[in-house]
Image (tube, rainbow, N blue to C red):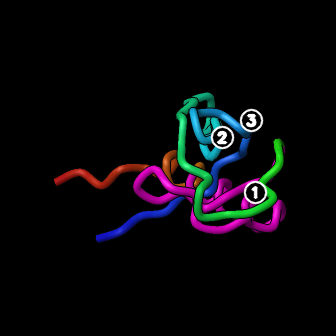
């Protein structure tokens, strides 16, 4: 099963080739590859999968998706 997450770009142009960047997801910061995309800017949301940004995401869509994840985290857990 594959899972891709929307993350907010907080730094670009990192790494020896300048094709890396830093992203933030709920306070968790991670260095990722931006090599598959052109024109990624600080503040953009990208879809992250396996350490690679796959596409730039509309900010409103990113917020809706992140809100859904937050709602799932707050949902009551079923007891066995």
Of helix, strand and loop, which one carries label 1?
helix
Q: How crowded is mark 2: few (under 14 residues within 10 Å), some or many (20 or more)?
A: few
Q: Residue 10 carries which label?
A: 3
Above or below — where is 39 with respect to 61?
above
- The residue shown at (60%, 41%) is 17
Of helix, strand and loop, which one carries label 3?
strand
Question: How many numbered discs, if any?
Answer: 3
Query: Looking at the figure, which quarter contains the N terminus?
Result: bottom left
- Residue 37 in the image: state x and y as whole percent: 67, 63
Above or below — where is 64 with respect to 10?
below
Distance, label 1 to label 2, CA atoms, is 27 Å
Instruction: Please tell me in which quadrant of the rendered image residue 14 appears.
Output: top right
36 sits to left or right of 8:
left
Along the viewing direction, whichever of 65 and 17 lies nearer the viewer: 17
Q: How crowded is mark 3: few (under 14 residues within 10 Å), some or many (20 or more)?
A: some
**Which of pointers 2 and 3 lies earlier in the amino acid sequence?**
3
Q: Do the residues labelled 1 and 3 touch (CB within 8 Å)?
A: no
Instruction: Please tell me in which quadrant of the rendered image residue 22 appears.
Output: top right
Extent of the magenta region: 43-69
Distance, label 1 to label 3, CA atoms, is 16 Å
**Which of pointers 1 and 3 lies earlier in the amino acid sequence?**
3
Q: Which mark is residue 18?
A: 2
- The residue shown at (49%, 47%) is 73
Query: Looking at the figure, which quarter contains the C terminus?
Result: bottom left
- Residue 46 in the image: state x and y as whole percent: 67, 58
- Residue 8 in the image: state x and y as whole percent: 71, 45
Q: Name the residue under label 1.
A: 63
Of helix, strand and loop, which one carries label 2?
loop
**Which of pointers 1 and 2 lies earlier in the amino acid sequence?**
2
């Amino acid at each position: 099963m594959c899972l891709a997450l929307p993350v907010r770009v907080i730094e670009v142009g990192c790494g020896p080739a300048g094709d890396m960047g830093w992203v933030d997801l709920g306070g968790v910061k991670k260095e990722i590859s931006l090599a598959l995309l052109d024109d990624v800017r600080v503040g953009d949301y990208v879809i992250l999968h396996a350490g690679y940004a796959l596409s730039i995401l509309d900010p409103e869509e990113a917020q809706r998706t992140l809100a859904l994840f937050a709602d799932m985290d707050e949902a009551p857990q079923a007891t066995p």
